[in-house]
Image (cartoon, rainbow, N blue to C red):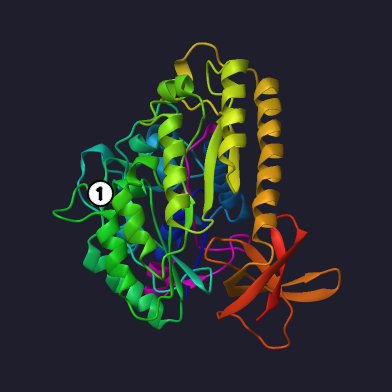
Amino acid sequence: MKKAALHNLGCKVNAYETEAMQQLLEQAGYEIVPFEEKADIYIVNTCTVTNIADRKSRQMLHRAKKQNPEALVVAAGCYVQAAEAELKEDSAVDLLIGNNRKKDLISILKAYEEGVQEDAVIDINHTNEYEALSVTQTAEHTRAYVKVQDGCNQFCSYCIIPYARGRVRSRSVADVCAEVRSLAEAGYQEAVLTGIHLSSYGLDLEGETLLSLIQAVHEIEGIQRIRLGSLEPRIVTEEFASALARMEKFCPHFHLSLQSGCDATLRRMNRRYTAEEYERTCELLRRKFDRPALTTDVIAGFPGETEEEFQETLEFLRRIRLFETHVFKYSRRRGTRAAVMQDQIPEPVKTRRSQILLELDRENSAAYLLEQKGRRAEILIEEKLILDGTEYQVGHTKEYIRAAVRSEQDLTNKIIPIRIGDMIGERLCLAELL
């Protein structure tokens, strides 16, 4: 039996696709081993969102070849789409598989073994096909990520993803629901709908929208929670928010992409909203839901960001009081418009600004959790954790607040009522069983 090892780099969509490829290999009779072990085939599902991601992808490919020079080393995914010519010249890489061809993994491997090296990198910008990948189990045992959409039409000036993933392509509602039913039958209680640009779901489908998809998944027996990946602020209309608020399974945790709280910076980024529109979205969600968790991403040191523009973002974040802010220093990405913009920000300035934003994030997060103290909630138990010699069982509320309880029973994969207590670690609350 041949041994295969897989390594994933990048986002939740990449992780989903890596799990799908692993299951294809298992069905074909391969034994899956850890990436650190000697294998016959190594597959690296690459990422290209930043130059650092490119470097990590190359490092993992070279590490695989070093572990077993006789092994077949396969580069798959986004970095392959962005740097096909470069990878063809890399002696550590034997085979390239681009996006939308991962579903053909087994036939591509078989052809290679027979001496036929198939060109498995398509022109991703000229396909309307949604790649038919699915999973029956995931690395997490209680929460299942379900990819429902691929591609992006936004072309933000800092982002290479539209070139690596192509245009918007949506998975059919029937196909999504079939996978979610299968996962529910396998015991998963929470489904997270995710995609490269989730808000664009349905643009290429007749009569379907992200809201209609969520409504269909809400009807599936066995699934107790529905969570969403990252959203654009403009999708959150009065109708959208009101409909979600009526769904008892829906989790009021909204990750709304921001990137900057300064309109001038947003225009240079080619983001399609203003800071005022973003703030109105937050206000709408807070009217429709009781203390929803609002989280975001922010880029520090985008080209041309003056100290005044940075302060505008900082004050904006102080005012809207988000639960969590994921802070990224701007990374120059070859092939994007931002990479050739004037007034690139020096690294020490980007570092200082990101540290200020991270400190504000810690303050906002602690304030949000303090507001939850004494509140009744439910958590889905996911794991056990030992802190200071005491064993806790840990899970998340619908708002994605991480909470720990003490119990002699094994509560894994059970949804239990709690009362939220004090923080006992960064972004971790003690909870009382009810």
Q: Give the residue at x 66% y 56%.
A: 371
| Quadrant of the rendered image containing residue 325 | top right
The mark tally for this picture is 1
Furthest toward the top, the residue is: 342
The amino acid at mark 1 is Arg
Q: Give the residue at x 46% y 81%.
A: 187
Horizontally, is 241 left or right of 362 in the view? left
Where is residue 401 drawn, in percent x and y? 61, 61
**Residues packed near mark 1 inside 10 Å, few (<14), some (14 to 19) or many (20 plus):** many
Front-most of residues 125 and 412: 412
- Does residue 426 show up? yes
Furthest toward the front, the residue is: 287
Does 343 lie within the magenta span? no
Q: Give the residue at x 60% y 16%.
A: 308
Front-most of residues 111 and 272: 272
Rendered position, 265 above or below 230: above
Front-most of residues 16 and 70: 16
Where is residue 71 drawn, in percent x and y? 51, 57
| Quadrant of the rendered image containing residue 103 | bottom left
Q: Which residue is mark 1?
A: 169
Where is residue 320 drawn, in percent x and y? 55, 39
Question: Which quadrant does the C terminus fall into?
Answer: bottom right
